[in-house]
Amino acid sequence: MAIQTVATSPIPGQRPGTSGLRKKVSVFQQPHYLENFVQGVFDTLGDAAGKTLVLGGDGRYHNRAAIQVILKMAAAHGFARVLLGQGGILSTPAASCVIRKHGAMGGIILSASHNPGGPEGDFGIKYNAANGGPAPEALTEAIYQRTLALAAYRISDAPDVDIDAIGARMVDGMHVEVIDPVADYAELMEQLFDFDAIRRLFAAGFTMRFDAMHAVSGPYARAILEGRLGAPAGTVINGQPLEDFGGLHPDPNPVNAEQLVALMAAPGAPDLGAASDGDADRNMIVGRSFAVTPSDSLAVLAANAAVAPGYAGGLAGIARSMPTSRAADRVAEALGVPCYETPTGWKYFGTLLDAGKATLCGEESYGTGSNHIREKDGLWAVLFWLNLLAVRGGSVQEIVEAHWQRFGRHYYSRHDYEAIEPDAARLLMQDLRIKLANLPGQKMNHYEVQAADDFEYTDPVDGAHASQQGIRIMMTDGSRIVYRLSGTGTEGATLRVYLERYEADPAQHHIPTQQALAGLIAIADSVASIALHTGRSNPTVIT
């Protein structure tokens, strides 16, 4: 075996987005494409002598082939050890857990998260730092700049490694340890939640369905829910990770998890429905004929955090992404703790968590988490809800409605316009920015604009600054419209429009969401001229 130096040249377009580099599988299969990016990562990280790298992914198509390449390149870069999930499987939350527990230099996670899989689908790669969280923007930009200057990459000519049998092997002097992908994560969950109370809940006849969507959360959910907690066999459905996710779109929302939503609306529905996404970092919570919005889920868990042993000592603070509803802000105010508003992207929570300023974090895109790792965590959120139901009693709907009674309801929805022409999307945002200065004071329907801006953020810990993070139109009654271009897609551009209306009156808490938001929806389309710019009269997806 020997280390080879392979000549290459820069490949355009390898700048990581909100959560790593995501492209079509066919793009990653191009000669040198994956190798160039990985070399950019390793060159940017520098000396790896004596260091440990964590490696794994969500099991989607091209995962196993990419792992072999990365192992051989890690050996060529001088890593002492790689911790690899068995079969190449390692959920994003579990990877963060393993990085932190074993003191790794960082980890490479292979996933395009909630994007479709299979040969015609998407693939992704991202680097997580030593704290277990996504690489900060300064590091991802340095990686990108390095990819623009590559002339060669280094790789071992060692044969492929057996990645399916747990145990140790060598690649050109580098130790490769194939590990149980669930063990470290399950141990951490048992430290955070009252497993005895949840076991009693299931023993008393409580029922649930967890839809793993043929993605990576399946083995974790089976091992913990059915194994350690005693949920009946069959509680986890679609639990076998498949390279194409069984043809499903592994995005846990009422549109893509329609099988689960239909089950929860049927006679004799389980007490709790839940789902997770491709790499297990997102979650959806559903009661009987009652879907919980991610914004409400964060607020409810924050208000009831003390039911879980890991959070019984109270919260240092709450953090939410800017487009996420302000439901958590009201909880933070009641608890007397700060609520931080950050740009979209879990990396922005990392400094707050590391500094002990925040304990719970959440994004409206079905992501919730805490300081136990540095990623959002789908199964963690489900276990938190189980712990809450075990201690509080009642149904999912009763718990949420009691929360609304106390704090008021934030009607909330996101309208996505997917795969639109990128230039049209950019022009729409440019036109909106031009209009911002003239919006305050304008009356639209029964709303009046109080303020309008393009969200900027200065990190309170390290001073890092981010600009143009989403356009906000804020009304005098607390309602909001937010426009943002997503960085997670691989085709065209995705315009996300977020709509929020606060309602304090309990008598007004049961209006259908789209009806409650109808006035804001009309304003959002009119102000941004969405139909004119995109050619779309309706959103692709409404959640």
Image (tube, rainbow, N blue to C red):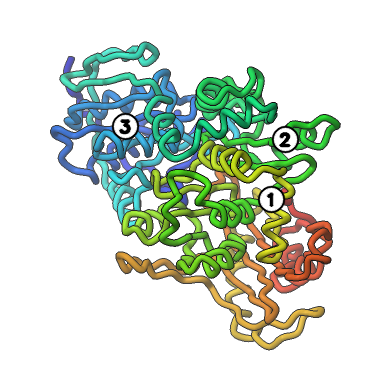
What's the mark number on residue 54? 3
The residue that disc 2 covers is 271
Density class for disc 1 (Cα within 10 Å; few <14, some 14-19, many ≥20) is some
Q: Quarter holding the N terminus?
A: top left
What's the mark number on residue 399? 1
> Going from the N terminus, do you reach mark 2 or mark 3 first?
3
- Residue 263, compared with residue 16, is above or below; it is above
Which residue is painted at 56% across and 57% down in the image?
Answer: 303
Q: CA distance from mark 2 to mark 1?
A: 13 Å
**In the image, is 359 to the left or to the right of 24?**
left
Q: CA distance from mark 3 to mark 1?
A: 39 Å
Q: Amino acid at mark 1?
A: Ile
> Going from the N terminus, do you reach mark 2 or mark 1 first?
2
Q: Position of residue 479 (x, y in %)?
A: 69, 72
Residue nearest the observer in this picture, 535 or 178: 178
Single out the mark in the foreground, 3 or 1: 1
- Residue 40, compared with residue 318, is above or below; it is above
Which residue is painted at 73% across and 55% down in the image?
Answer: 401
Q: Amino acid at mark 2?
A: Asp
Residue nearest the observer in this picture, 117 or 305: 305
Kindly state the secondary structure of the residue where label 3 is placed.
strand
